[in-house]
Amino acid sequence: MTSLSRSGHTHPLGSMTAEFPKFKGPEETHELATRMARDAGMNLAEWMRTLVMIRVHGVDMIARLEADRLRVVAGIGDKSGEASV
């Protein structure tokens, strides 16, 4: 049986099951990162995950995945970005 996310769908790059290591850093860095995340409308974990994914996969690919997701939500395309019938 395939394990799905709460929404019933997995992320296009695979399920979010890999654990990344926690690390300690300077308090000022944490505060600034938290502020940057809040300014982006995200919590710190989401912001850090997005940052890692952009660095690993490239901003163009992550932007394309987000655009595809928004088109599906808007009902103007499928997962490949094609217009819906």
Image (tube, grey):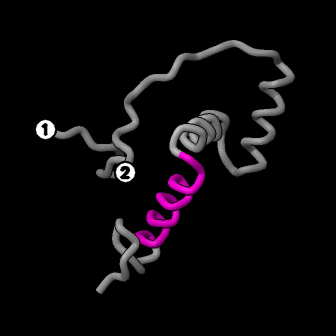
Classified by dominant secondary structure, the portion drawn in magenta counts as helix
Alpha carbon of mark 1 to alpha carbon of mark 2: how far? 18 Å
Q: Which mark is residue 12?
A: 2
Residue located 60% across and 39% down the image: 55
Give the residue drawn at x 63%, y 35%: 48
As shown in the figure, which amino acid type bears the numbered disc 2?
Pro
Residue 30 in the image, given as x and y percentages of width and height = 78, 25
Instruction: Please name whichever residue, 63 or 37, is drawn nearer the observer in this view of the structure.
Output: 63
SS category of the residue bearing label 2 = loop
Residue 76, labelled with which disc?
none
User: Image quadrant of residue 47?
Assistant: top right
Q: Is residue 17 left or right of residue 61?
A: left
The answer to whether 14 appears left or right of 45 in the picture is left
Work out whether 18 lies above or below 59: above
Q: Is residue 69 magenta?
A: yes
Given the current orientation, which residue lies at the most extreme right position? 28
Q: Amino acid at mark 1?
A: Met
What residue range appears in magenta? 58-73
The residue nearer to you, when weighing 5 against 66, is 66
The C terminus is located in which quarter? Answer: bottom left
Taking the view exactly as shown, the residue that stands out farthest to the left is 1
Q: Residues within 10 Å of mark 2 (few under 14, many from 20)?
A: few
Instruction: Check disc 1 and report the residue beneath it.
Output: 1
Residue at screen point 45% across, 23% down: 19
Q: Is residue 7 visible?
A: yes
Q: Residues within 10 Å of mark 1 (few under 14, many from 20)?
A: few
For label 1, the SS is: loop
- Residue at x-position 35% and y-position 39%: 15
**Residue 73's quadrant in the figure?**
bottom left
